[in-house]
Image (cartoon, rainbow, N blue to C red):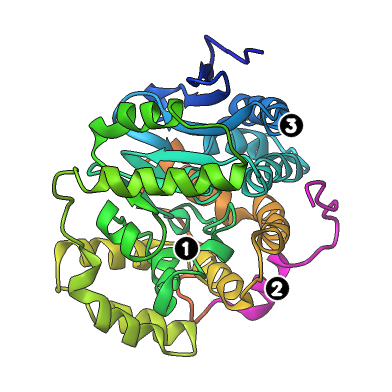
Amino acid sequence: MTYDVTEGPLLVSTQTTAIGQQIIEVVLNTPAALNALNGDMVDLLLEHVPAWEADANVIAIVMRGAGNKAFCAGGDIRQLYGEIAAGNQHVGEVFFNHEYEMDLMLHNLTTPLIVWGNGYVIGGGMGLLQSAAIRIGTQSSRLAMPEVTIGLFPDVGASYFLRQVPDQLGLFLGLTGAMLNATDGRQLGLLDGLLNDEHYQQLMQCLLAMPSQSHSQTLVQLKDKVRKLETTRSEMPESNLDHHRTEIISALKQVELADVIAGLANLKGASKWLDKAITTMEQGSPTSLHLYHRLFQANFSNVEQALLQEYIVGVNSTRLDEFKEGVRALLIDKDRNPNWRYKSVETTPKNWIDQFFSTQDVAPANFS
C-alpha cells in the first residue's frame, strides 16, 4: 500500500525496503514560512499517522522540513491572533486541542519516529522534535522556545521535556528563549545524534537496508546506525552554553522567580550569546515568565500531564490580553514595543497568574 501525498503543505513519500517493508518520509512543505506548523499540516498528520502506526509493514517514519533553512520554526500564530481579534472566544480550545492531540499522538507511537532537526527548530517545531524516538541535529540546527516574547509560554509539552534537562537548565531555556546549537542540544539531552546535513540520504539508505524485525529491534538498530554515521561527521559548532553553565546553574538555584531573573541579569556582558538570551527575558512578558515558572515547578511525570495543564493555560491565554498584545507588537504592527499588563515579575500579582490556571469556562481537553 502506498501513502503518497505529492502536493500541499505536507508531503508523504512511501519508500520500500530491500525486503518489501515501508519507510514513510514526511516533509513539512512550507519553506517560505520556515515550515511553520499550520492547521492543514496538523490535520494531515492526525489523519495519516494512525494508519501508518496500524500498518505492520511500516517499520519507521522519518520527518524533515523542506529546504535547508528550517525543520519547523513554530506554529501559525498569525491565524490564531486573527481569530482572537475577531472575538472568537473558543478558538483557544480548538487550536490547542488540535495541536496537542497531534503532539501526544506522536509521543505515543510504537513505530519509530526519526526527526531530522536541521536549521531552525522553534516552538511547535520543538514539540515535534521532542516527540521523536530519534532526534537528529546537524551543524545548522538552532533550537529554541522563545514564547515569552509573544506573551505566551513554552508549550507543546515543554513543561515536561524541558524539565528533563539536567541542572534545571530547562528553566533557563524557557525564561530566556536561548538559542541552542546542535552541540548544546546534545549535551542537554534534547538531541540523540549529531550528523552533517549531507548525511540525510545515508540515513535513509540505512533504513532501506533494514531487515525484518520488531519496532523495538528496529529502534535499537537505528540508534546504532546513527552512532556509526556520527563517526564520519565533520566538526560540530562549539557549545555556547558550556562557557556559562556554572554561573547559570547558580542563578537557577534561587527559589523566587524574581531572584532567578536578577541572578541571570547579573551575568550580562559575559558573551553576545548570553546577552541576547538575557535581553529576551528582560523584554519578554512578566506574565509569561510567571506562567512558565509555575508550569516548570509542577514537575509533571509525563508529557500527557504537561499537555493537559498547558491546554488550560493556553486557552486562558487566548482570552486574556497578554498574548494578543505580544503577537501584535512582534508580528502584526511589528513595533516590538508590547504594552505588557504588568511591567515586572515583582509587580505581577498572584491572582492574575491564577486566572490562567482556572478551569472555569474552559471545555475539557479531548486529546487525553
Residue position for label 1: 285
Q: Looking at the rendered structure, which numbered label has been put on residue 171?
A: none
> Residue, x 51% and y 26% (percent of image)?
26
Per the image, label 1 sits on a secondary structure element best described as loop
Q: Residues within 10 Å of mark 1 (few under 14, many from 20)?
A: many
> Label 3 sits on what residue type?
Ala
Q: Residue at x 38, y 79 (%)?
A: 261
Quadrant where the N terminus sits is top right
Choose between 361 and 135: the one closer to the eye: 135
Q: Which residue is mark 2?
A: 354
Q: Is residue 268 visible?
A: no
Instruction: Verify whether residue 367 appears in magenta.
Output: yes
Where's residue 350, x and y in %?
64, 79
In the image, what residue type sits under mark 1? Ser
Image side of residue 126 versus residue 155, left or right: left
- Locate residue 365 relative to residue 183 in the image: left or right: right
The residue tagged with tag 3: helix, strand or loop? helix
Residue that label 3 marks: 54
Relative to 249, 343 lies left or right: right
Residue 304 sits in which quadrant? bottom right
Q: Amino acid at mark 2?
A: Asp
Residue 88 falls inside the magenta stretch: no
Q: CA distance from mark 1 to mark 2?
A: 16 Å
Q: CA distance from mark 1 to mark 3?
A: 43 Å
The x and y percentages for residue 29 are 46, 21
Ranked by sequence position, the earlier of labels 1 and 3 is 3
Q: Which residues are magenta?
A: 348-368
In the depicted structure, whether residue 101 falls above or below residue 4: below
